[in-house]
């Protein structure tokens, strides 16, 4: 029997009986799976950094309750409060992305992080969920009032955000932002002719990226012809899934993580495949599917265009990010430097996903009293 009665009128009581508990449960399980996989994947990485074997694992464990608290705290907000929070986060993240081009840390040829002394932060991680909500507001305003300003602002902000991501460069994240924004644009009433034009522009942009950005061409060439360059990480990742077979080698028994440089971040799905097997990988896939499908279900039930567009943008971001990470590990797509939400190591990524899930839970809460949007 639940501790909280349906007649409980406190903030927590109203939240518990209106929040999507399926999404909440799936998210909690993902966080727990992330802890388990980080405990398995990070010791070799920490030793290569001359740190205590469980140094990175301890940091990740400390991040988990903070991320869960952020997610719950944001989910307690009304849609109107979420919109205000999104505008604030977007403004700060946008300024941070601009600053990272000048004072950011350069890691593997990219300037995405800002050193704050005690920790480094990646502003572009926070631009994703906040931009989805901000764009949803402007798209909905245009659709409901027919004023052209909303759509113009949404397009201008999109150009600025994607431009900054390309300058960093971070093509993978730009792809996620583009896909979510395009889905939102369609829902706002974009005509089929304009949709076709934007799709053609997207294809042209990918072609230009191939010819103008050497690292993009290198990854695509390696994907199409593995013999054309260094494909060590992807080959090693595939070996992990082969070694793990159906049920895995057992917790801590994997060996691929000892030689795979990004086993704790971009290729943590490979660690799951080797140590816990195909069944565990399918379990992770199902958990992400629950989050996405529950979000889309709520979007279909929404009477508010703003909430529907915001929910769609958020679930497309979360689902696509997970799909890109898993697909890269399995060589289904060219390798991308994208983390697996709530699973991979990284404080900025975890906190940003917590904000995104909190916003999603806030929008999908039942609002029988007609909460303001």
Image: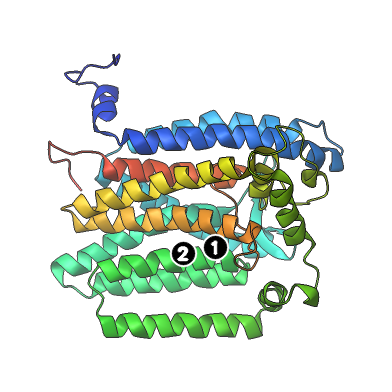
Quadrant of the rendered image containing residue 325:
bottom right
Residue 91 seen from this side: no
Up-down relation of residue 209 to residue 116 (above or below): below
Tag 1 residue: 173
Residue that sits furthest to the left in the current view: 369
Residue 238 seen from this side: yes
Asked whether, in this view, residue 14 is left or right of residue 295, the answer is: left
Q: Quadrant of the N terminus?
A: top left
- Which residue is found at the position 71% from the left and 51% from the top? 242
User: Residue 281: image x %, image y %?
Assistant: 57, 45
Q: Are marks 2 and 1 in contact (CB under 8 Å)?
A: yes
- Which residue is found at the position 74% from the left and 38% from the top? 42
Residue neighbourhood size for the residue with mark 1, other residues' Cα within 10 Å, grouped as few (<14), some (14–19), many (≥20)? many
Q: Which mark is residue 177?
A: 2
Q: Secondary structure at mark 1?
A: helix
- Which residue is found at the position 13% from the left and 41% from the top? 370
Residue neighbourhood size for the residue with mark 2, other residues' Cα within 10 Å, grouped as few (<14), some (14–19), many (≥20)? many
- Which residue is found at the position 77% from the left and 56% from the top? 236
Asked whether, in this view, residue 10 is left or right of residue 58, the answer is: left
Residue toward you, 40 or 87 = 40
Quadrant of the rendered image containing residue 246:
top right
User: Residue 280: image x %, image y %?
Assistant: 57, 40
Residue that sits furthest to the front in the current view: 246
Q: CA distance from mark 2 to mark 1?
A: 6 Å
């Amino acid at each position: 029997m639940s501790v909280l009665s349906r007649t409980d009128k406190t903030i927590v009581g109203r939240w518990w009986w209106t929040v999507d508990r399926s999404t909440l449960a799936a998210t909690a399980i993902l966080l727990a799976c992330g802890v388990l996989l980080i405990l398995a994947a990070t010791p070799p990485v920490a030793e290569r950094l001359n740190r205590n074997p469980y140094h990175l694992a301890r940091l990740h464990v400390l991040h988990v309750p903070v991320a869960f608290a952020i997610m719950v705290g944001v989910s307690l907000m009304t849609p109107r409060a979420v919109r205000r929070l999104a505008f604030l986060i977007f403004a700060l993240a946008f300024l941070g992305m601009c600053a990272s081009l000048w004072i950011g840390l350069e890691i593997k040829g990219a300037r995405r992080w800002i050193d704050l002394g005690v920790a480094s932060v990646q502003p572009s991680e926070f631009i994703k969920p906040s931009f989805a909500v901000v764009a949803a507001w402007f798209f909905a305003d245009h659709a409901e009032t027919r004023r052209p300003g909303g759509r113009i602002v949404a397009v201008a902000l999109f150009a600025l955000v994607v431009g900054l991501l390309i300058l960093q460069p971070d093509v993978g994240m730009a792809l996620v932002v583009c896909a979510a924004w395009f889905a939102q644009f369609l829902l706002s009433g974009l005509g089929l002719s304009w949709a076709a034009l934007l799709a053609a522009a997207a294809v042209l942009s990918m072609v230009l990226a191939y010819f103008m950005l050497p690292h993009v061409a290198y990854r695509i060439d390696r994907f199409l012809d593995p013999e054309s360059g260094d494909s060590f990480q992807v080959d090693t990742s595939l070996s992990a899934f082969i070694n793990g077979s159906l049920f895995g080698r057992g917790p801590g028994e994997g060996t691929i993580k000892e030689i795979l440089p990004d086993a704790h971040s971009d290729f943590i799905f490979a660690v799951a495949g080797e140590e816990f097997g195909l069944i565990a990988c399918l379990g992770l896939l199902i958990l992400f599917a629950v989050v996405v499908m529950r979000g889309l279900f709520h979007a279909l039930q929404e009477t508010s265009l703003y909430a529907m567009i915001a929910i769609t943008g958020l679930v497309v971001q979360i689902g696509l990010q997970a799909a890109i990470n898993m697909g890269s590990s399995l060589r289904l797509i060219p390798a991308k430097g994208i983390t697996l939400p709530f699973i991979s190591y990284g404080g900025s990524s975890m906190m940003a996903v917590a904000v995104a899930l909190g916003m999603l839970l806030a929008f999908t809460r039942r609002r029988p009293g007609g909460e303001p949007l």
